[in-house]
């Protein structure tokens, strides 16, 4: 195990303990959490649909996917959210040093040439490291208040960057109004934090 891996695990352990101790993560989030699963998220969605149908309500579901979600996490917004959730002082400075000062370039392998082609190095100001344990946890914090952007007649269920929104209303007309408002609200919220829906993988179903 490298010294970097140890360093990352120490940050993860302390951050995850703070999140759990203070009950920070939204109960609607099932992704990357201990004692949680896709089965539990699916059960929550199905249960909400059946509850609405049993009560003779109109019910529809928006099943969403985010476009390049992990790559679009803005570091400044993430740091602000960490501060909001009580991460301060030297520990916050440590996380900032982990996020900042990273660079990337693109290497093109030219099969029929002697030399590969490489772009120049550019500083990374967005995105959380993927393939490492801290990236998913940072992302959960980044989108943690998504359920708060919707009205009381909607149920949000998240699994990392995939999420479902179940909307219930007494009749079809009010369901359509609620659907349009919900889509508008979440789109505005995502734009504010530099995320966007992947409309090629986002679907609406009425039950």
Image: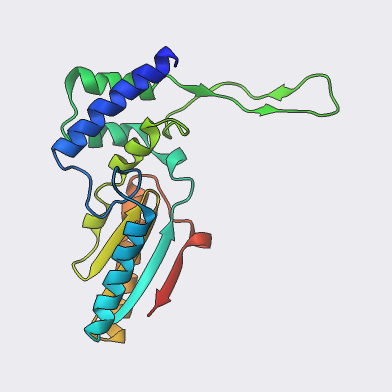
> Does any portion of residue 174 appear in the rendered image?
no
Tell which residue pokes out farthest to the right in this image.
Answer: 112
> Does any portion of residue 79 appear in the rendered image?
yes
Residue in front for this viewpoint, 76 or 132:
132
Q: Percent from the top left, x then y, of residue 12?
A: 30, 28
Residue 42, picture quadrant: bottom left
Q: Residue at x 37, y 50 (%)?
A: 191
Query: Which quarter of the rendered picture does the C terminus lie within?
Result: bottom left
Query: Which quarter of the rendered picture does the N terminus lie within?
Result: top left
Q: Please give the count of numbered marks on the rendered protein.
A: 0
Tell which residue pokes out farthest to the left in this image.
Answer: 22
Relative to 120, 137 lies left or right: left
Q: Percent from the top left, x then y, of residue 17?
A: 20, 32
Relative to 106, 80 lies left or right: left
Q: Which residue is drawn at 26% across and 47% down?
A: 144
Residue in front for this viewpoint, 28 or 112:
28
Residue 136, picture quadrant: top left
Relative to 140, 124 lies left or right: right
């Amino acid at each position: 195990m490298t010294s970097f891996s140890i360093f990352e695990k120490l940050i993860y352990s302390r951050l995850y303990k703070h999140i759990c101790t203070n009950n920070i993560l939204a109960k609607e989030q099932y992704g990357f959490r201990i004692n949680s699963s896709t089965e539990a998220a699916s059960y929550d969605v199905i249960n909400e649909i059946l509850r609405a149908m049993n009560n003779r309500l109109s019910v529809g579901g928006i099943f969403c996917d985010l476009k390049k979600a992990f790559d679009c996490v803005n570091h400044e917004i993430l740091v602000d959210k960490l501060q909001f959730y009580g991460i301060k002082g030297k520990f916050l400075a440590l996380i900032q040093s982990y996020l900042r000062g990273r660079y990337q370039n693109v290497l093109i392998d030219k099969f029929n040439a002697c030399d590969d082609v490489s772009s120049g190095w550019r500083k990374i100001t967005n995105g959380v490291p993927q393939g490492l344990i801290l990236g998913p946890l940072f992302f959960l914090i980044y989108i943690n208040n998504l359920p708060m952007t919707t009205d009381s007649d909607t149920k949000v269920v998240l699994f990392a960057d995939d999420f479902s929104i179940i909307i219930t209303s007494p009749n079809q007309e009010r369901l359509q109004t609620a659907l349009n408002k919900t889509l508008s609200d979440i789109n505005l919220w995502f734009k504010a934090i530099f995320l966007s829906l992947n409309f090629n993988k986002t679907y609406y179903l009425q039950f």
